[in-house]
Amino acid sequence: MKILITGGAGFIGSNVADLLIKNNIEVVVIDDLSTGKLENVNSNARFYKCDIREPKVFSIIEAEKPDILIHNAAQMSVRNSVEDPENDASINILGSINIFEACKKYGTKKIIFASSGGTVYGEQTNFPADETHHTKPICPYGVAKLSVEKYLYYYYVTYGIKYTALRYANIYGPRQDPHGEAGVVAIFSEKIIGGDQPIINGEGNQTRDYVYVEDVAKVNLLAIESEFTGEMNISTAVETSVNELFNILKEISGRQNLHELHGPAKEGEQKRSVLSYNKAELILGWKPEVKIRDGLARTYNWFKDNINI
């Protein structure tokens, strides 16, 4: 079996690639290295530097003829999507269509898509939200992710290409980039290791569902073997506030001199986000294994060993 991973030099894609290769699966990586890093690419994967919007995508897929596409490449910044929705749509929608067309032309059988459970639902009314929750995204990034899910349905009913849209909660772990639009775990870890004081946006009571990247990699492995077509949440169903997150990292670091320092709240930020993973457990037999405290300790120690302050 051959798997092509777009965004395979990035945080999530590279962790997925490592696990697949460990399981003796042939892996090909496409990444334009705009945010991904070449050192993240497994030495046993074939690598192509390419923007998913380029015509070159067709020649790569013609040459490689992957059985399955794992599509992670994206413009990942919610903030940038608000400031420049046209660019967000160009990469996340048109880039996706470009690679789906290549998959259709050269016989790819299935697509596994990195969707966003944190944004496609919009403001939640049910906690934890399952896949029947309304989808009313309130940022262009979420609109684009939901649009790509609809395109995947189109390619399935029209051309028979199966798909699994994995609606991820907030993923954290080793290789997460603490710069730009990064997860709060990476940002706080870098600040603490560098001897700085992290700043918490607003009161810090906003909650998120944090899922460890190793668990995310495992669900991709399970999705490869599954016949399921449709959408499913990948989450922990546990809410953790930003204040709680800060205090756990403070404890892990041993820096008792740190205190909760609050800055301005982010405009339009969701107050609560937590997702049910019952569907993934029922269909794939998947459930999160890494608890938040353990995952934060692993992540903090990785940053301590790898970050250049």
Image (cartoon, helix red, strand yellow):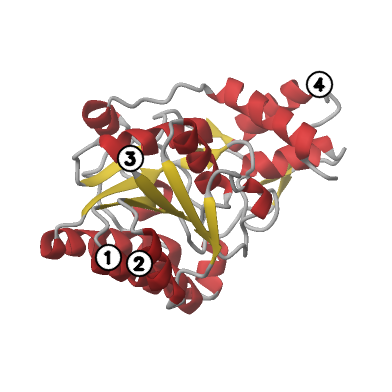
The three-letter code of the residue at mark 3 reads Asn
Distance between the alpha carbons at the discs numbered 2 and 1: 6 Å
Q: Which residue is mark 4?
A: 254
Q: Calculate the distance from the C-alpha at mark 4 to the C-alpha at mark 2.
A: 53 Å
Which comes before the other along the chain, label 1 or label 3?
1
Q: Which of disc 1 and disc 4 is earlier in sequence?
A: 1
Q: Residue at x 43, y 43 (%)?
A: 26
Q: Are marks 2 and 1 in contact (CB under 8 Å)?
A: yes
Separation of disc 3 and disc 2 at Cα?
A: 32 Å
The x and y percentages for residue 228 are 19, 41
Q: Are marks 3 and 4 in contact (CB under 8 Å)?
A: no
Q: Quadrant of residue 135?
A: bottom left
Amino acid on which the number 1 mark rests in the picture: Tyr
SS at mark 2 in the image: helix
Quadrant containing the N terminus in the rendered view? top left
In the rendered structure, the answer to whether residue 227 lies left or right of residue 116 reads left
Picture coordinates of residue 46, whole percent (x, y): 52, 53
- Closer to the chain start, of discs 3 and 4, is 3
**Height in image: 266 above or below 26?**
below
Q: Nearer the viewer, residue 69 or 128?
A: 69
Q: Residues within 10 Å of mark 2 (few under 14, many from 20)?
A: some
Q: Earlier in the sequence, mark 4 or mark 2?
A: 2
In which quadrant will I find the C terminus? top right
Whether residue 189 can be seen here:
yes
Report if the CB atoms under discs 3 and 2 are less than 8 Å apart. Answer: no
Q: Nearer the viewer, residue 146 or 124?
A: 146
Q: Identify residue for label 2.
A: 62
Question: Element at badge 4?
Answer: loop
Name the residue type under label 4: Gly
Mark 1 lies on residue = 106
**Foreground disc of the pair 4, 2:** 2
